Image (cartoon, helix red, strand yellow):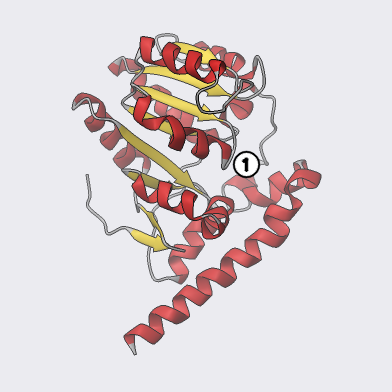
Amino acid sequence: MIQRSDIYILEVSVKSMNVDELHNQISDYIQKKQHQLILNVNVHCLNLAYKHTWLRDFLNQAAIVFCDGAGVMLGAKVLGHHIPERITYADWIWQLAEFAEPRGYTFYFLGAQPGIAQQAAEKLLQKHPKLNIVGVLDGYFDKTLGSADNEAILSEINRLKPNILILGMGMPLQEQWLMENWERLEVNIALTGGAVFDYISGNLQRAPQWMTDNGLEWLGRLLIEPRRLWKRYIIGNPIFLWRVLKQKIRQRQQLS
């Protein structure tokens, strides 16, 4: 794996890496039977981490935090760094399945509305019939630490001991659940996929290809779900860029 310096964006350490490098690192963790968090950030997540110290600290505990958004790539560029590509789950999950299938890595899907994660699993299996998905469960359970629901889910996951647990609960709920339960989960790797199961299952429409290829997926998502996402993008994106610019000014002042 090519060694690159971590990029600190709003005090969160982000890896500059491509998909092949990420796959190689995942393979290494599994082969060595390690217990590692691999998280991702987009502009929305970095804005949340700016406000919530617990989230920022949790992200910085992860073995890898990769870039999942053109806005993060832009932020890195403003700060004088380069991220080779954004790794977004709607695309990457298919690449990960192709990578994992011949290696026999096992998966557990947790999250989304009832039936959605199962639909996603079935779609993946249509293309990758030997993909080893050992368990699927929706995200509608009592997530309170110590609740009967939560304890039952932990027991089920630990009984199956998947190599890779993929959470699809949305930010920052999925990160909070992982933070509270990570030390008790008997998995090699945990991934936070947000709306990944909605996308794979076809229950959530993606932006047109020309948008996703040109850093405008955020605009496509805004047009598809304006009532839910307008604050995240119309307000959140400019705030993020202003914060990054302030970080750039502070860095210049420290060097002068």
Q: Which quarter of the figure has residue 24?
A: top left
Residue sitting at x 61%, y 22%: 142
Name the residue at the front extreme: 146
Residue sitting at x 62%, y 29%: 199
Q: Is residue 106 left or right of residue 137?
A: left
Q: Residues within 10 Å of mark 1 (few under 14, many from 20)?
A: few
Residue 222 point in image, percent of width and height: 73, 48
Q: Which residue is mark 1?
A: 209
Circle 1 — which element? helix
Residue sitting at x 65%, y 66%: 238
Name the residue at the right extreme: 227
Residue 197 point in image, percent of width and height: 58, 25
Q: Is residue 227 left or right of residue 42?
A: right
Q: Which quarter of the figure has residue 36?
A: top left
Camera-side residue: 90 or 209? 90
Q: Amino acid at mark 1?
A: Gln
Residue 164 point in image, percent of width and height: 38, 24
Residue 82 point in image, percent of width and height: 38, 61
The image quadrant where one finds the N terminus is: top left
Relative to 112, say whether 92 is above or below: below
The image quadrant where one finds the C terminus is: bottom left
Residue sitting at x 53%, y 50%: 42
Relative to 17, say whether 74 is above or below: below
Camera-side residue: 195 or 49? 49
Give the total number of marks visible in the rendering: 1
Name the residue at the left extreme: 32
Relative to 142, say whether 56 is above or below: below
Camera-side residue: 80 or 252? 252
